[in-house]
Image: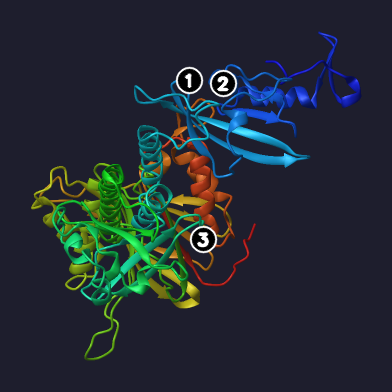
Amino acid sequence: MKGATGSADPRHGGSADPRRGTVRTAPDLMAALLERSGEGIVLCDADGVVTLANAAAVRLVPRVEPGLPAPAPIGSIPSAPEGRSVVHGGRMIRMRAEAVGDGRLAWYLTDLGLTEPGLTDLGLTDLGAEPSPAARRTEFLLEAGRRLSASLNPHRCARAATELGADFLSDVAILLLPPASRRRMEWVRAVSGRNGAEEGVLPAAVAAEVPGLTDALAGLRHGVAGQQDPGGTPDWLLPEGFGPAGHLLVLPLPGNGVPAGAIVLARRAGRSPFDDDDQVMARDLAIRAGAAISAASLFREQSTINTILTGDLLPPELPEIEGMRVAGRLRASQQAGAIGGDFYDVYLPDAAPDTGIVERPPLVILGDVCGKGARAAVLAGQVRHSLRTLLLLESRPDRLLELLNRSLLTSPAPNSYVTMILAALRTAPGDHVLVDLAVAGHPPPLVLRRDGTVEEVAVRGSILGALKKITLWPVTLDLAPGEVCLLYSDGITEAFGGPSGREMFGEARLKEALATCAGMPVEALVERLEQLSSEWLGGTQQDDRALLAVRAGTGRVETSW
């Protein structure tokens, strides 16, 4: 490319290439970056002579050449920082200029695509005149598509619509959104020549003062909706110092069955009225803005519903339990939803309303349902809520599992299989904690003793939801102060990864990792184990993973080894 690169000069600094005997200079590196840019870049000196042009600029304006005056359209339009779209060589080009010091200008050329047939180039002889209606409409459609598709936020879409109206059609554009209640309405206003838009709220009764607005919000597209008598324009509609409105256009924004709002376009007195081309563009703007706002509103509504519905499916905040510490970590295989088939929960006892006596110990659970994603998360949520109800009738872990199994067998959902650990926690003298464990088809818990040894608890039982009668072998575990009982799902031990990417993490590695956590706070312990599991996976997602740890005592306990 001419002008973008030059001969290497060691005096300019750079690194020598011994194989070629040349020097890579800073200008050379900058030129290489410019060559890779998809945007055309042209640098002109104070006299309008091109000093640099990259390949993208040469493709759009073939006559541009370093050392020569900038050709049309580069040297023939005002250097507007906000940019201007022109037609050149059958293509629409967005051009903007920035001052770079010493009177030099940097031009940035963006290819907006082929123009409609019949449009003439805006070359040296055309640029002093107003763009043709077809060119103006093409630029409007390109800008409308770009701005209105850039967000799924209703208010940002409304701002984009008013800015488009003020840039292309009017001196001021006001968009009013349907009232969330019968009393208040939100509005957005943009003024031609000003950056940004204003927002506010006003009473619906006040908004009804705008001529034709009530009908526009009702979705009427003909008759009273359209050009209005500017004499009825309320003062609050226009910005301070605007003066009287000379022309007023009010249009509905079509939505999903109901209007998405209404847009008001106003021109100052003395300007030409809205002609047929203006009204066609205004209706096009209203249709596009209505579709964008409706889509954004639907997305927001669905997101809100999704947040509400998934709220109970996410892992709970773990409460404080007297005489012990509890911490958990959960990672769903489908990160987009952050929910899955692994779950844990803690159920604190309620005091009897008549005596105030606590009738059962705290209960912690960790489980894994068949499947992944949203369906598995729904079943996991049902299991958690079923246990909460069953605790009103029963507190023994083994008996709770038997009742839950009967409930799952009657579930209409297919493959309602669940593995689970239930642990009732009781404090004992000497800051000990007694853990009454019952396991249904789940990996047995691990115990980290104070001396760093790790034991696997000899407890087992049948999977839930598969057999009418299950067999359980519950046990009671004694934790001394500082000792930890770890519940985990098989997503931890069955994670494939490691150096080869095909090796299972396994129970032996989990036990080794747990042994290194002696003396750690329980929160740090589960975080470390989860981190080691994630590092083993190497960024891949395979199965849901859950960890829940119970540590006896609330203070720091020194290890004995």
Say above or below: 392 vs 413: below
Dot 3 lies on which element?
Answer: helix
In primary-sequence order, the first of circles 1 and 3 is 1
Q: Amino acid at mark 2?
A: Val
Q: Position of residue 166 (x, y in %)?
A: 41, 53
Q: Please, which residue is most extreme toward the right here?
A: 11
Q: Are marks 2 and 1 in contact (CB under 8 Å)?
A: yes
Q: How many marks?
A: 3
Alpha-carbon span between mark 2 and mark 3: 63 Å
Work out which quarter of the rendered image holds the N terminus and state it. Answer: top right
In the image, 44: left or right of 329? right
In primary-sequence order, the first of circles 2 and 1 is 2
Q: Which residue is mark 3?
A: 523
Dot 2 lies on which element?
Answer: loop
Q: Residue at x 51, y 49 (%)?
A: 529
Q: Which residue is mark 1?
A: 89
In the image, 2: left or right of 436? right
The mark found on residue 560 in the picture is: none
Q: Amino acid at mark 3?
A: Glu
Q: Residues within 10 Å of mark 1 (few under 14, many from 20)?
A: some
Q: Please, which residue is most extreme toward the bottom here?
A: 354
Q: Residues within 10 Å of mark 3 (few under 14, many from 20)?
A: some
Q: Residue at x 54, y 46 (%)?
A: 513
Q: Position of residue 73 (x, y in %)?
A: 56, 28
In the image, 474: left or right of 92? left
Q: Given this view, does label 2 or label 3 mark the residue nearer the observer?
A: 2
Q: Which residue is mark 2?
A: 61
Say above or below: 226 vs 133: below
Alpha-carbon span between mark 1 and mark 3: 66 Å
Is residue 537 in view from this perspective? yes
